[in-house]
Image: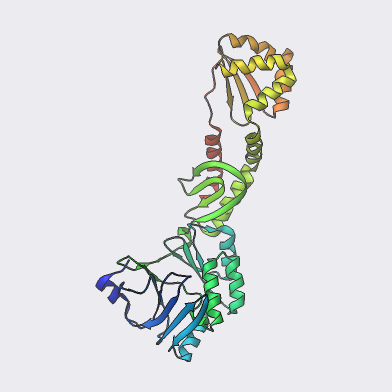
Amino acid sequence: MLGGKEGVNMERSGNLLVLEVNKPYRASHIKYYFSNTFPQPLFPNADYVGVEILPFKGEGEVIIEINQGVATVTKNTVPDSVMLKLKEYRSSRLTIDIDTPYIPLDVLRKVYSISSTPHFVKTRSGYHIIIPLQKAMTFDEKIKVRRELGDDEERIKYDLELAKLNLHGLTEILFDYKWWSGETRFHKWRHVHIEEVSKLGKLPFKLPKMEVLHGLVKIDGNKVILEGFKVKDAERIFISIQDNLWEYAIRNEKEEKETLEERLFSMVEQVYGVSFAMKLKMEIRMGFIDIISDGETLILYLKGDSQKLAGRLIGKQGANVKALSSKLGLKVKILTEKEVKPPERNEHEELRRRLENVLKTLVH
């Protein structure tokens, strides 16, 4: 952040384009001007000020007044030669403003299909993306691509209004410094490497909330947030998560509609009859039978008098328990207090460990 003398001395190259505006995107008074010194953060008539560093010098100012939704240029002292330089500069690059804390993987894929050397800037609420263009795009072509890449829609609408005023050189600005009313300093955004960009992948299914690889991969529902990776590595990890966990997700989705206990009681009714199912339900609810499951095996651990139910549950030569396993789609085991009780297993933790092991092979 900049302020005071530090701000004044920051830039003296005469290549600053400054915007002063009240109520950004809904302004009634907009002022652009060139400056050879960094402006002080004292603007009595402005709510917002942006400063852009340009690769060439300029001069003059543009003032736009907006009355009842109609924009009019009331002053323009910028030479045509400077405005032409601005327009050419805008056409040489594509800029995107994403106001979310992460960039979707599909957006990054499109960005790199346009240029292999995009630049990323971390802002207060998201990211700026600057894409050098080998071949210039028309204004309309750029608007289309900007929408496809998730550019701020308010920014797009603002640029469309400027284009109507034939001010194409003032469109698609990404400011290097910003000031808001009430603040005493300018904010300077920071250029970051692609590894520092938070990336988002969206799964076609939901998973429990978890973190793996020391927090570099975070999962919450259908969102996968990836930190510290290049785009190709992030995509490989995301695809691996999708490929390895879709079976769990399908099973989990079914179980959300019908809990494991409800499924168990329903299947017990079919295999053992209603009367036995009611007795089993009561024993479970009273804590005499523990249900232990890791998602693949279901164990009924019988304690106290409930151990008398073991023979019925297993059946001759295991026929009953085999039938129950078949209907549940899980391997069912019947254990009593005479046998060692297996530890309670957290299916989500098992899932996290499984995923951790899979992903380790991709990052080492």
Q: Residue at x 51, y 52 (%)?
A: 226
Near-viewer residue (83 or 106): 83
Position in image of residue 70 (x %, y %): 53, 78
- For the question of whether residue 262 can be seen, the reply is yes
Near-viewer residue (164 or 11): 164
**Residue 306, image quadrant:** top right
Name the outermost residue toward the left: 5
Q: Is residue 88 above or below residue 315?
A: below
Position in image of residue 265 (x %, y %): 67, 22
Q: Residue at x 51, y 42 (%)?
A: 210
Position in image of residue 1 (x %, y %): 32, 66
Name the outermost residue toward the front: 68
Q: Is residue 121 above or below residue 205?
A: below
Position in image of residue 30 (x %, y %): 43, 77
- For the question of whether residue 92 can be seen, the reply is no
Horizontal side of residue 172 vs 14, given as left or right: right
